[in-house]
Amino acid sequence: MPDEVVPTTRLLTEHKHPDDRETFHAMIERMRSARTSFSSRHRIIDTRGVTRSVIVVGRTFTEAGVVAGTEGFYLDVGGVVEDSVRGRVADHVQHFREHRAVIEQAKGMLMAVYGIPPDRAFDVLLWLSQTRNVPVHAISDSIVGTAISGTWIPSTARRAFDRVLLDGAERAVADTLDHTDQR
């Protein structure tokens, strides 16, 4: 409730988050020595023990030409910051979901063609992305699109892959039957 306590520097310091106290003291010292306005962003711990992100805006005031104290306000921005972060995270997650499939397809193609592990395939996509200044998903989309058109692989290689595909399916059937028989 307003006017319950008198806000002193000591009281404010006691409520500063321990990691922010040094910065707070440096700000107070700058304000005292330079006799200037100030602002900062830090955390306080309220009377219930909840850590809150705040912005402090203040200035010194004088009486008879001598600095007599400071005045200003605290602005709790915790909800605003949390909402902003939450929104950015949601956007990144949505972006990832939208582009994950095509990136995985391109990785799989690189793995199959070059016989490399998944992390190395992603490194190749990342390298192409960085050297071309194009997002990984755009590189992946282009690779997959070219491959789907069917023009990137000779018919002899396609026939060889047909054997891999069909033999792999037969092995999967046999493995499934073996596991079923063992039960």
Image: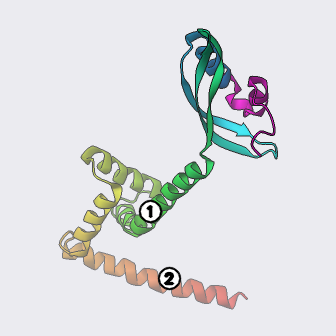
Residue 125 found in image quarter = bottom left
Residue 18 magenta-drawn? yes
Location of mark 2 (residue) = 171
Q: Which mark is residue 149?
A: none
Give residue 19's quadrant in the image.
Answer: top right
- Amino acid type at circle 1 is Phe
Q: Which residues are magenta?
A: 1-22
Quadrant for the C terminus, please: bottom right
Identify residue type, mark 2: Arg
Q: Which residue is mark 1?
A: 96
Q: Residue at x 81, y 40 (%)?
A: 4
- Quadrant position of residue 143: bottom left
Residue at 56% of width from left, 51% of height from top?
Answer: 80
CA–CA distance in space, label 2 to label 1:
34 Å
The secondary element bearing badge 2 is classed as: helix
Percent coordinates x, y for residue 152 in the rendering: 20, 68
Q: What is the residue that sits farthest to the front in this orientation?
A: 64
- Residue at 71% across, 87% down: 182
In the rendered image, residue 117 lying in the magenta stretch gets the answer no
* Residue 14 shown left or right of residue 67 in the figure: right
The tag earlier along the polypeptide, 2 or 1, is 1
Residue 179: image location, x then y, percent: 65, 85
Q: Is residue 33 above or below residue 23?
A: above
Q: Is residue 19 above or below residue 69?
A: below
Viewer-side residue, 131 vs 73: 73
Q: Position of residue 118 (x, y in %)?
A: 45, 58
- Horizontal relation, residue 119 to residue 72: left or right: left
Neighbourhood count class around disc 2 (C-alpha, 10 Å): few under 14, some 14–19, many 20 upward:
few
| In the image: residue 132, left or right of residue 46 | left
In the image, residue 42 above or below residue 176: above
